[in-house]
Amino acid sequence: MLLHLVSFKYKDDVDGATRAQHRQRLAGLKGLDGVIDLKVGEDVVRSPRSYDTGLSITFPDRAALEAYQTNDRHVAVVQFASALCAHVVAVDFEI
């Protein structure tokens, strides 16, 4: 299996409602083919090194991750986030 982790740092001018909308759109990806498990949440620690939103998705294999990356629903969420985020980091590893 493969774990896909993404952290989002929003631009300073992005309000709470828009941040919540982004998390809701991310959560809506749970039903996509190949997604075994999906969790999304707001950072609660708020340390200087914290990002604002975290996403974890478990896939059965790399092929499922690659199909997810090009899925139209995922691409739409990426496009929405691109206007909101100052920085995004990701890591994918086998579990």
Image (spheres, rainbow, N blue to C red):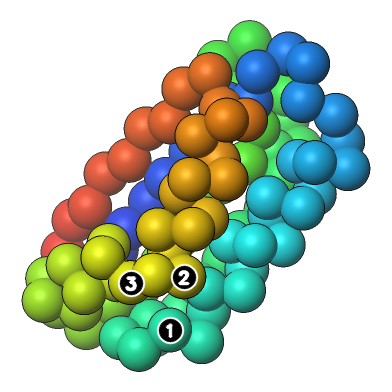
Nearer the camera: disc 2 or disc 1: 2
Disc 3, disc 1: CB below 8 Å?
yes
Q: Earlier in the sequence, mark 3 or mark 1?
A: 1
In the rendering, at what x and y percent does residue 2 appear?
21, 69
Q: CA distance from mark 3 to mark 2?
A: 6 Å
The image shows residue 84, relative to residue 21, as above or below, that is above
**Residue 32: assigned label:** 1
Q: Amino acid at mark 1?
A: Leu
Task: Please state if 87 lies on the left or on the right of 20 as rendered.
Answer: left
Q: Which residue is mark 3?
A: 71
What element does badge 3 sit on?
A: loop
Q: Residues within 10 Å of mark 2 (few under 14, many from 20)?
A: some
The image shows residue 83, relative to residue 22, as above or below, that is above
Q: CA distance from mark 3 to mark 1?
A: 8 Å
Task: Please state if 85 lies on the left or on the right of 19 as rendered.
Answer: left
Instruction: Identify the residue at image location x=12%, y=71%.
Output: 62
Q: Which residue is mark 2?
A: 73
What element does badge 2 sit on?
A: helix
- Observer able to see residue 40: yes
Q: Amino acid at mark 3?
A: Asn
Q: Earlier in the sequence, mark 2 or mark 1?
A: 1
Q: Quadrant of residue 93?
A: bottom left
Instruction: Identify the residue at image location x=80%, y=41%.
Output: 18
Disc 2, disc 1: CB below 8 Å?
yes
- Observer able to see residue 1: no
Q: CA distance from mark 2 to mark 1?
A: 8 Å
Quarter of the image with the C terminus in it = bottom left
Quarter of the image with the N terminus in it = bottom left
Disc 3, disc 2: CB below 8 Å?
yes
Q: Name the foreground residue: 21 vs 5.
A: 21
